[in-house]
Image: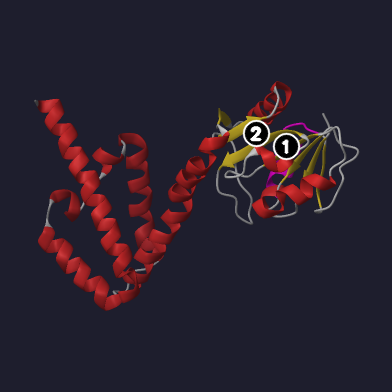
Amino acid sequence: MRLAIVGRGRVGHALAGALERAGYEVDGPLGRGADAVEAGAVLLCVPDGEIAEAAAHIAPGRLVGHCSGATGLQALAPHEAFSLHPLMTVTAEGADFAGAGAAIAGSTRRALQLATDLAHALKMVPVEIAETDRPAYHAAASIASNFVITIEAAAERIAATVGLGRDQLVPLVRATVENWARLGPERALTGPVARGDETTVARQRDAVAEAAPGLIDLFDALVIATRALAAEREREHEVQTA
């Protein structure tokens, strides 16, 4: 099936290139407002708020999909609709989709099959996400990706006040993520909060308040969340040893 990509942003360029390399005949990425009349299927890679308008320009009779994580298929009506959201961050340098998850949906069996085929062509792992579950799915993705960057930016800002750069933090971050992936959150958790060392936590809080007072609310919220995770770990340990 000839496939058109609409949207010339990072995701549109990355998916167009990856699908061409996977053997698809791809038109695009095309500009917003394209009717994609020569394609049998169209994948819209546009901001969520512009999906409905972009879909309205597509010639009738085509399978029309979007790559939004949070938006349902209703935005593509009245087209036969599908969605394909790569669970992968895409930068200006592109992305490697192989091995990543892909949230898929389809308004018909044929549309769902196309989303599945596209995911497999990109060597992704397709997971069908219900319409009502998409906000929670996308929130999890944002926490796992966007919010991690926010936290690392905070760490980098505080580290800079004592002469540490990003390069010194990177090995710690990589090891932490690998431990989380291999062991799960409870077993991977380390540090003073996990040990119940409240004296050290208090000293850290004073240091953050002095070095970057704008981050103190974030620090407090993370301490509370980390205490809850540590407590969950202790409860599981008690059950296992009872």
Residue 157's place in the image compared with 145, above or below, is: below
- Dividing the image into 4 quarters, which one contains the N terminus? top right
User: What kind of element bears circle 1?
Assistant: helix
Q: Residues within 10 Å of mark 2 (few under 14, many from 20)?
A: many
Q: Which mark is residue 19?
A: 1
- Give the residue displayed 25% in from the left and 51% down from the top: 226
Identify the image quadrant of residue 25.
top right
- Give the residue displayed 43% in from the left and 61% down from the top: 150
Q: Which mark is residue 122?
A: 2
Q: Which residues are magenta?
A: 13-24
Residue 15 within the segment the image draws in magenta: yes
Residue 121's place in the image compared with 193, above or below, is: above
Given the image, on which type of amino acid does mark 1 rest?
A: Leu
Residues at marks 1 and 2 touching, judged by CB atoms closer than 8 Å: yes
Please identify the dominant SS of the magenta region: helix
Alpha-carbon distance for marks 1 and 2? 7 Å
Identify the mark nearer the N-term, 1 or 2. Answer: 1
Residue 84 within the segment the image draws in magenta: no
Given the image, on which type of amino acid does mark 2 rest?
A: Leu
Q: Position of residue 26 (x, y in %)?
A: 81, 39
Residue 217's place in the image compared with 98, above or below, is: below
